[in-house]
């Protein structure tokens, strides 16, 4: 009798623990350019009451929330900006236990680990990890050829501007050159800066646009507790974001790129003595209005006095 009661108790305990244990990540693969991708999440726990919710997170971001749904509707006030308007769940998700997330227009930068957490009255019932891998679309030669000519032309026309910007940092830091392109009207564009090797202790980093018109984009300063604080420049509040503020990754996300955002950007890392220790030049090309942007750059450059 005692043995039977103990078996029932142990069975119930294991069933309860099963609802709270995190499952290993499943992997989903998709090509960039696909209309959407489904991140699966199925639970058997009771999630039908009014006090339940499901949250999809990507924990490596400063703002981790990808999507949240409660019984009656979605709650997206704390959603990461890069996922705005790109995620959805079934209206009956919490009634059926199918908590799968649809992510529209996946890009390579969406690759990573996503966590689906079912909660009830503030307690985690189930946590499922999904590994998403978004691969670049295999090249289509007609499209590649169509881009070769404007890209080469862009490199030649921007050469003079890059040379001028490079002169500003060549005597104080080791510079590298990167080029990025984006279609006007896109949701965002990333201006990359990611160093895998360790750098001397940095206390301040700064993004500025050097050409065609100088302007401060944003500055990050490390406080006494070792945390980084982002301070957008004039005109860029709400348009710039850094997902991972670490000594190795200060990639800048520029939201809703405009035609006049095209130009030469400079990123500088400052050490404890406030002297530059690293710099990178990033050339941004807004594709749909590339000719207007480039001609405007050279018209302004020609009117500026030599430094």
Image (cartoon, grey):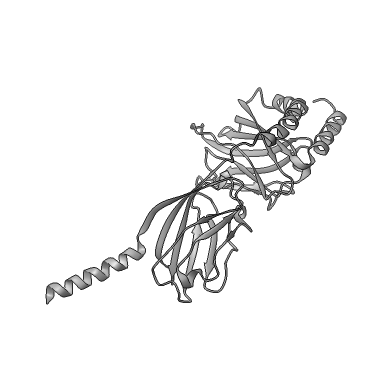
Residue 253 lies left or right of residue 152; in this view the side is left
Considering depth in this image, is 210 or 194 the residue closer to the camera?
194
Q: Quadrant of residue 12?
A: bottom left
Camera sees residue 56: yes
Residue 302 vertical placement versus 70 (above, below): above
Residue at 61% across, 43% down: 220
Considering depth in this image, is 175 or 142 the residue closer to the camera?
142
Location of the N terminus (image quadrant): bottom left
Residue 163 vertical placement versus 268 (above, below): above
Residue at 73% across, 47% down: 234
Residue 168 lies left or right of residue 223; in this view the side is right
**Count of marks placed on residues:** 0
Q: Position of residue 302 (x, y in %)?
A: 86, 29
Residue 86 lies left or right of residue 168; in this view the side is left
Camera sees residue 52: no
Residue at 54% across, 51% down: 62
Q: Position of residue 202 (x, y in %)?
A: 55, 36
Considering depth in this image, is 169 or 238 the residue closer to the camera?
238
Q: Position of residue 64 (x, y in %)?
A: 52, 55
Residue 64 vertical placement versus 280 (above, below): below
């Amino acid at each position: 009798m005692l043995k039977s009661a103990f078996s029932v108790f142990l069975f119930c305990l294991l069933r309860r623990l099963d609802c709270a244990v995190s499952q290993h990540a499943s992997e989903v693969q998709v090509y960039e350019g696909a209309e959407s991708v489904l991140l699966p999440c199925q639970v058997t726990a009771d999630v039908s009451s009014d006090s339940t919710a499901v949250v999809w997170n990507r924990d490596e971001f400063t703002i981790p929330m990808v999507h949240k749904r409660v019984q009656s509707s979605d709650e997206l006030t704390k959603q990461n900006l890069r996922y705005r308007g790109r995620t959805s769940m079934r209206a009956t998700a919490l009634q059926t236990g199918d908590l799968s997330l649809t992510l529209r227009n996946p890009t390579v930068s969406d690759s990573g680990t996503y966590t689906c957490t079912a909660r009830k009255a503030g307690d985690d019932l189930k946590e499922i990890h999904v590994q998403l891998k978004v691969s670049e679309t295999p090249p289509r030669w007609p499209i590649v050829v169509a881009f070769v000519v404007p890209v080469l032309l862009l490199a030649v026309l921007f050469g003079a501007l890059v040379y001028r910007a490079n002169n500003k940092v060549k005597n104080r830091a080791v510079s590298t050159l990167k080029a990025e392109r984006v279609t006007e009207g896109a949701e965002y564009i990333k201006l990359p800066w990611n160093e895998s090797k360790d750098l001397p202790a940095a206390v301040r980093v700064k993004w500025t646009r050097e050409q065609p018109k100088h302007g401060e984009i944003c500055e990050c300063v490390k406080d006494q507790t070792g945390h980084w604080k982002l301070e957008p420049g004039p005109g860029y509040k709400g348009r710039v974001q850094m997902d991972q503020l670490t000594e190795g990754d200060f990639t800048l996300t520029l939201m809703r790129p405009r035609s006049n955002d095209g130009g030469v950007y400079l990123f500088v890392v400052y050490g404890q003595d406030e002297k530059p220790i690293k710099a990178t030049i990033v050339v941004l090309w807004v594709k749909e209005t590339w000719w207007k942007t480039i001609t405007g750059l050279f018209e302004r450059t020609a009117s500026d006095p030599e430094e």
